[in-house]
Image (cartoon, grey):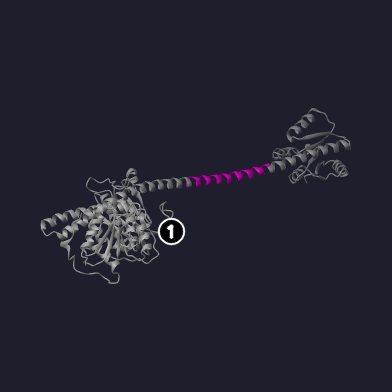
Amino acid sequence: MKERVLILAPIGRDAQAAARNLADVRIDSLICLNTADLLLRLEEGGATALVTEEALLSSGTESLERWVTNQPPWSDFPFIILTSRATSEATHAYRLRLLRSLGNVSLLERPLNTVTLMSTVQAALRARRRHYEIKDYLLERDSMAAQLEDLVRKRTRQIQLANRELRRETSERKQAEAALQQAQKMEMIGQMTGGVAHDFNNLLTAVLGNLELATRRASDEKVQRYLEGATQAAKRGAKLTGQLLAFSRTQRLKTESVDLNAIVTAMSDLLFTTIGSTVRIETFLQKGLWPAVADPNQIESVILNLAVNARDAMPDGGRLTISTSNVVRDDPSKPYELGAGDYIVVSVADSGTGMTEEVLAKAFEPFYTTKPVGSGTGLGLSQVYGIAKQTGGTVSISTKVGHGTTMKVYLPRSTAQATSQPAQDHTTQTLRSHEATILVVDDDVDVRELAVSCLESLGYLVKKAEGGQAAIDLISAGAPIDLILIDVAMPEVNGVQAIRAITKIRPGVPFLYMTGYVGRTSLDPSEHRVLKKPFTIAELAEKVEELLFPDEGLRSSNLLSKVHHLKPIR
């Protein structure tokens, strides 16, 4: 239909004659009955229209002009109008109007020869083919433009997603950098704090040990009161040292599988007594809570510390909420520094004053406190932080000034059944004496002499060495030793290294570590052969007997029979 010629010549035999001539040169044509039929065929498709002038005069050109006006942009349909020889002004004006209204019009005056007609038709066909090429080009262009727009939309979407991912990665990188900087700062402070606490712990070990020995010897009640006062002050110092060691993550934790719900429930009376009646205490304990890896005594201290801090943040009273929950490994709310795995959270929230950004940035630093002078040491939160980190978890703070604070302690999930073992009370532990040779190894002379005096008072033969290498040399020389009591943190050769060397020389020799600061050693935190500094004589005696006489069961006897004959502490 695109190649056919539409013929409108209703008068005479012009239509048939034109159709025959076109057929002779293999051009398809179609004879139309009237203007309406021509319009219908134009809608179907055609290359050009061969129309006699009188056909348009009889039916008018309005409808045909509308069709020409509504052509698509690529189309300029060619019309061939066969005119008469009339030359009146009206005829001339009419033909000019046709040229203007129908656009692409060729006028051929009759009579005309076949060659003229065919050449004009061929020219119209070529022009129309060009129109269709333009149409195809425009369609292809539109298609390509649509494809390009679609590609641009897709690419824009990809860029948006990439930008969103970049912003997320940038945010995570900033969080990671902030977490790393905080961890490095806390690590540096922890190392410094641990070193100070180690030295202070040795001093307290000597002070408390000598006070205990002196107390056992003193008979004057007034002297006993003096010694008791000094002992209590030294114990407060030992408590501060313990908090420092907790922050530096160098204290020895007795971790086990614990039920946090049971611990919180058991602490209810203690919390009520400590917090007071102006604060309402609420607990929300998750059913089916997983067991957690923790030191039961230390986690109680953590909860109590957080509760006391919450109380102090609500001077006019308020609400304290303690809750527990399970946190799965892929929970997006987990703190960034936590490793993969499941965790258990114990949360302590208050409705108090909240923290400013400045306070929040320093909340875990030791000795930093916003409380009045004499109201706090600034070690509570640092101890909480250290215990959580040493256990394998962390602590997060969510706070807003005037809207309270929520502290969340994350602890690793335990795969073992939760147990709870009460701590042994050494205050009434009975002692007895035995004959055995014990080697005391410690680089601190005061602690070394204290241990020597205590063991000699129990009837043991005692040898001493001022360091790890000296102990190795003594054993290598063949000295008869039944037990080695050795400090962990010593210069050059530490206690762990010394014991490894000694057990190669004398396999199976019993040994007992003394430590208040593990530091950078490979001491197994589950090692049972550890005596924590500062220690009492009863604790020392019990540990020594456990290793020297493991098959005798529970040790029992009267208190030190030679207490009044103890050697003075140098």
Q: Residue 433: x and y, percent?
A: 22, 67
Residue occupying the point 85% across, 37% down: 119
Side of 392 relative to 208 (left or right): right
Question: Is 212 or 370 nearer to us in this picture?
Answer: 212
**On the rendered structure, is 15 left or right of 296?**
right
Range drawn in magenta: 141-168
Q: Could you classify mark 1 by the number of other residues whose Cα lies within 10 Å: few (under 14), some (14-19), or many (20 or more)?
A: few
Task: Answer with left or right where residue 320 lies relative to residue 167.
Answer: left
Residue 199 lies, in percent from the top left, at: 28, 50
Please tell me whether residue 165 belongs to the stretch shown in magenta: yes
Residue 256, picture quadrant: bottom left
**Magenta segment includes 493:** no
User: What secondary structure characterizes most of the magenta part?
Assistant: helix
The kind of residue tagged 1 is: Gly
Pick out the residue farthest to the top.
89
Using the image, determine if residue 489 lies above or below residue 76. Answer: below
The image quadrant of residue 524 is: bottom left
- Residue nearest the viewer, comparing 344 with 535: 535
Image spot of residue 494 (x, y percent) = 34, 55
- For mark 1, what is the residue? 341
Furthest-front residue in this view:
477
Secondary structure beneath disc 1?
loop
Residue at 36% x, 49% y is 187
Q: What residue appears at the point 79 percent right and 27 percent down from the top-left corner?
A: 89
Quarter of the rendering occupied by the C terminus:
bottom left
Q: Position of residue 514 (x, y in %)?
A: 29, 58
Asked whether the viewer can see residue 450, the reply is yes
Between 174 and 276, the one lying in front of the other is: 174
Report which quarter residue 449 is drawn in: bottom left
